[in-house]
Amino acid sequence: MPGVQGPDALEHALLAALADGEWHSGADLAQALGRSRAALAKRIAGLNDADIGLRIASRHGLGYRIAGGLDLLEDAHGQPQAALRGLPGLRLLRVCDSSSTRLQAEPEARVCLAEYQTAGRGRRGRRWQAGYAQNLLLSLRHRYPSWPTDLPALSPLIGLAVARSLAADGIPARVKWPNDIWLEGRKLGGVLVETRGEAQSGCELIVGLGLNVHMQSATVDQPWHSLALAGLARPRAALASRLIAALEQALEDFPRRPLAEQLAAYAPFDALQGQDLAIEDAGARIEGAYRGLSARAGLRLQTATGEREFVVGEVSVRPGPGASGGS
């Protein structure tokens, strides 16, 4: 969706006024925003036509309303919500192609949060679209002075950091190897770790995290879930702040602590325990019983011909015969 524009300052103030999900009269909104009712109606029509997953309802005698309200990352004045204030290198975007792409283009930015993405990237190029201000779309930059050993193990460890942070907030999330976040057997979100750099100049990581927070409907080819559907929704700004801290801690710990020590915390958050799996690898389908992670965070599968290990990035996982849950 090239060329999609996000709400400007006036439109954002309008959305903030409607964020409570209640009806607001056109006269009251026009007065509060310093615009005529006709100008306001034109802006509302533009937002409804913008193809960013927004729907502002209008009704004679009641005015305007956004059903269910909005959980915005900025206040009415365009400043970060309280939970996000003071975070160094924070970039808040209303609409962008991809938070990770924008972060890569801004070397001084450290964290990027977006209300809506037109071209968000997932594993193997998959897209995961959600309406405006519905989900958490987060990208974080981290630099290492040299390339860490065991780098493929980072994806499941980042997933573990996310699941542990959510669990501390009362959300019983789990990790589906290598980089999905599950809740109640369905996909709640995903992690994407992208690397850049040369051996002599260090390693830069862009860690992307997408998490379904308020999403109620979607066209997706696998079972999915959201915090709202599970009755576990949290304010997105506070959720983002906690997850940023958890991700940064995991990234700092990764080259400093023994990998075995870090992986020891994985099992209680492992969504695949006790399942039979089918793994697709280079066009082949391999079935077997899941045996946990290897010492380098690969997936161990007991097959008819013996145990095999699959490393991060080489396979996709699907439940096999007798397994439960989604993909």
Image: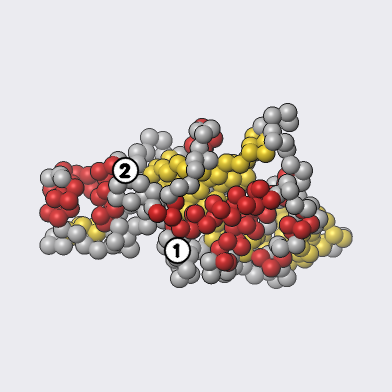
- Residue at image position (62%, 45%) is 193
Mark 2 Cα shell of 10 Å, populated few (<14), some (14-19), many (≥20): some
SS for tag 2?
loop
- Residue 57 is left or right of residue 205, and the answer is left
* Colour basis: secondary structure
Res 151 quadrant in image: top right
**Relative depth, front residue between 316 and 82:** 82
- Residue at image position (69%, 33%) is 202
200 lies above or below 129:
above
**Percent coordinates x, y for residue 76 in the rendering:** 29, 50
Q: Amino acid at mark 1?
A: Arg
Give the numbered dot on residue 163: none
Mark closest to the chain's N terminus, 1 or 2: 2
Where does label 2 land, which residue?
A: 7
Give the numbered dot on residue 234: 1
**Relative depth, front residue between 307 and 134:** 134
- Residue 133 is left or right of residue 187, and the answer is left
Quadrant of the drawing holding the C terminus: bottom right
**Percent coordinates x, y for residue 111 in the rendering:** 51, 43
**Percent coordinates x, y for residue 256 in the rendering:** 73, 48
- Residue at image position (29%, 53%) is 16
Q: Amino acid at mark 2?
A: Pro
Residue 282 visible: no
Q: CA distance from mark 1 to mark 2?
A: 24 Å
Mark 1 Cα shell of 10 Å, populated few (<14), some (14-19), many (≥20): some
